Amino acid sequence: MRGPNRGAAALSMLMEPDGTGVWQDLVNEFQSLNPNISVRLVEGPPATNTREDMYATSFLSGEAGFDVIYGDIIWTPKFAAAGWLLDLTSRLSTSDAEDFLREDLRASFYQNRLYRIPAFTDAGILYYRKDLVSPPPETFEDLQRLAKTFQSGDRWGFLWQGKQYEGLVTAYLEILWGFGGDWIDPDTREVLLDRPEALRALEFLRSTIGTISPASVTTYVEEDTRTLFQNGRSVFLRNWPYVWTLMKESPLRAQDRVGIAPMVHSPGHKSAATLGGWGFAISKYSRNPDAAWQFVQFLSRPEQLRKVQLRLGLIPARKSLIPSVFTEILDSARMRPPIPQYSQASDILQRWLSAALTGRVDPERALSNAARETRLLLGL
Amino acid sequence: MVRRFGSHVQAYLADAGWFIPASILLLAIVCYPILRAIGLSFVHESLANGFHTEFAGLDNFVRILGDSRFRGSLTTTLLFTLASVTAEFLIGLLLALSTTSLRKWRNLPRVIFLVPWTLPTAVIAVLWTWIFNDQLGILNAVLIRLGFIDSPIAWLAQPATAMAAIIVADVWKTTPFVFLILLAGMQNVPQDLYEAIEIDGGGIWAKFRYVTWPHLLPFVFVAVVFRLVQAFAIFDLVWVMTGGGPGGATETISVYTYQMYMRYLDFGYGSALAIATVVILTLAAGALYRMLVTRYERIF
């Protein structure tokens, strides 16, 4: 379906299923502005992991399977280290560099080169029942005390994501950072999972199970916890900003009975939110890198991000478009370890956290095993 | 004896020419990947070292010994293999025995039983995923209507039921294979032996025990070894139904190896995992061969 012009370029991009059709609308708009570039939008499966593997398969073959990548923030180090991404450092304009959220932009670099243009951001948030609790808790002790005070027969105190998957890692990290600990030091790559803070964070999560959180919290993902909270079944909820958008129509938010706050922390330490998000990158194998860059530039412009924001509820990674309620929380966002072997490190942590939370392994042993396996992975 | 052997060699060489084109193809698509995997298992080549090839000696194999996730997936694979092959063998044997004794319409059940075997595994996996779906699945609907359960069960979301669901789907899909092989074996049994047993006053059990079973043994070996190898290497069914989850509870060795290659991009260690799987399988098949075939030879 190449255009008639001599300089015609065909691009393709793999993405999530385009349920609302917003992405196709953007593609159409781009094509009408750039008649010599055609873009094929490939709707992949909804599972992020599967799309990550699809990208990897296409790059491993060395073919220009996909020109533009719409990817999870944690793919960046892996794809960049594998040499699959085009270096965009010199292409980023100063005004864009200033408008993108600091941490989102930082996470787009690998070894001081830019490989990704941020599009949407995500950060863990503490949702609370404003009608019961005001002001929101600041420390772990506050949270536990308030949860216990206000939970009742059909209302739990605190909901979080405890299933063995990436969500568990993001939830745990916020607690870990709140205790002043860390997982892998981003500079020295030192593994800190067998430090006392890591154990305290795990003990905290474990102590909530069956007391302020339901026993089945260890099988919950985002949507399970959102549904319960939205139906008034919990005082607190740890989740992402999308819940705020989805609850717009619900009675709780309509009656102003829900508030959002940064995640709690221990005295003397700061709140932290796990940074998530999506962005665009360009394949090193692309035959039309300049056309691809034109397309990426178009998509990451404020007007286009705003359109997606309105249709999908995602938060653009641009300071100029951040709803003010989220400013404080997004400021506390921290990125997960920017290492190429991230997915493997995360799988190790998920397995041992889950083992400890479901009582199969004692927390201290789980963390020392996780630390040992992670060190082995990083070759330390 | 020597002369006969010599002429055999001559005839063989004359015929061998015809095998060359096919052999080249076979070398390219079978032998090359195997040799490459063996080669890769002795090097470090991964995302972590920028895909440079560095000689690793036995490093990758030593790493397997201390890999708790490998042990977990090995246990899962063994459990799956034992459960599914046992069930497939017993059901297949029962079906083969019962349809051989049919006098009329004996081809009809044979055709029907073969249908699952002819469908692609990925299609079957999707089919069973829908059957086991917690909200829309027919299994929950039937169980609720019959009063066995009050509320829908999320079969694929819990470790034990997810494993059981995969085993059920696999048994449904591959029992026909066992059935077919055993059915072929039964055609091989000399009918006069049954008459001899009848004359000696033996019943159905005696016929099975002293005539059918001994004749069937080599076929049992073929069926079980083939199934064992396939079950041990199970990937597609698991990948589509659970992806190895929940929480790694259905992660088989093949799924783990796939993750090592495609997600973690560690080609050296991934190859070592593949080689280890082949070694384990070869040992198991060898043991089975000694057990079954030696016994068969002793009978005759």
Image (cartoon, rainbow, N blue to C red):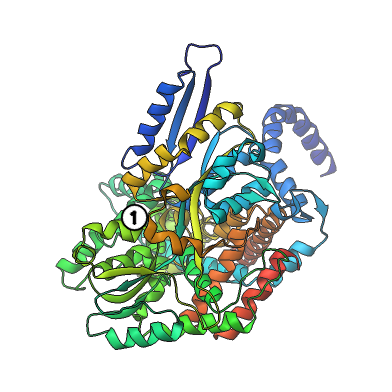
Quarter location, residue B7: top right
- Helix, strand or loop at mark 1: helix
Closest to the observer, A214 or A125: A125
Q: Residue at x 62, y 62 (%)?
A: A337
Give the residue drawn at x 45%, y 54%: B237
Residue B121: x percent and y percent? Answer: 43, 48
Residue A168 % position (x, y): 47, 69
The reply to whether residue B211 is in sight is no
In the foreground, B270 or A117: A117
- Please state the chain letter of the residue tagged with numbered disc 1 in the rendered image: B
Residue A27 vertical placement versus B69 (above, below): above
Badge 1 crowding class, 10 Å Cα cut-off, few under 14, some 14 to 19, many 20 or more, is many
Q: Quadrant of the C terminus of chain B?
A: bottom right
The residue that mark 1 highlights is B128
Q: Which residue sits at x=26%, y=67%? A: A230
Amino acid on which disc 1 is placed: Trp
Q: Position of residue A149 (x, y in %)?
A: 30, 88
Total number of numbered labels? Answer: 1
Give left or right: position of B54 versus B222.
Answer: right
Foreground residue among A166 and A317: A317
Question: Compared to B161, does A204 lie above or below?
Answer: below
Quadrant (top left/top right/bottom left/bottom right) for the N terminus of chain B: top right
Side of A196 where A227 appears, left or right: left
Image height of A289 relative to A343, above or below: above
Measuring 21% from the left and 73% from the top, which residue is drawn there?
Answer: B149
